[in-house]
Image (cartoon, helix red, strand yellow):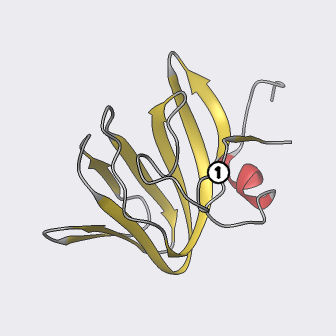
Amino acid sequence: MTADTRNVLTALSTISEHWQPHRLVSINDYDVKVVKLQGEFVWHTHPDTDELFLVLSGELTIQLRDRDVVLGPNDVFVVPKGVEHCPRADQEVHAMLIEPQGTVNTGDAGGEMTSPLRELD
């Protein structure tokens, strides 16, 4: 194992707060983020980019205005750019997100749930 290798489970074990994305790695102009989720987030959109969710453990509901998308372990869903959505996790979820660098977690909504991208220790 080299210093450039990252283990997803080890990375998640260092995260203590929910809705606080941490950069696992970057590739080209994208960040691969790991995050723990619990509770309901905020309704928001990302006007300029799609957002990929990969659930690693737990069950995540991506609420859309016209339907709910339920994701279990190893499920992937892409929220198209400009689509309003609200993630909800009734129990703790571990997830990976892939987004362009600089994407704000609350998109156009802002507010107290906005979190700067954090680096893993």
Residue at 48% across, 68% down: 41
Q: Is residue 60 left or right of residue 83?
A: right
In the rendered image, the quadrant that contains the N terminus is top right
Residue 63 in the image: state x and y as whole percent: 29, 70
In the rendered image, the quadrant that contains the C terminus is top right
Q: How many marks?
A: 1
Query: Could you say which is closer to the camera, residue 88 or residue 48?
Result: 48
The residue singled out by tag 1 in the image is 115
Which residue reaches farthest bottom?
90
**32 w.r.t. 115: above or below:** above
Q: Is residue 101 left or right of residue 109?
A: right
Residue type beneath disc 1: Ser
Residue at 27% across, 56% down: 84
Residue 38 in the image: state x and y as whole percent: 57, 75
Residue 114 in the image: state x and y as whole percent: 59, 53
Residue at 50% across, 36% down: 103
Residue at 16% across, 71% down: 67
Which residue reaches farthest left?
66
Q: Is residue 100 left or right of residue 34?
A: left
Q: Say few, some or many: other residues with alpha carbon within 10 Å of mark 1 (under 14 / 14 to 19 / 20 or more).
A: some
Residue 86 in the image: state x and y as whole percent: 37, 65
Of helix, strand and loop, which one carries label 1?
A: loop
**92 w.r.t. 21: above or below:** below
Would you identify the image quadrant in which residue 61 lies?
Answer: bottom left
Would you identify the image quadrant in which residue 13 lies?
Answer: bottom right
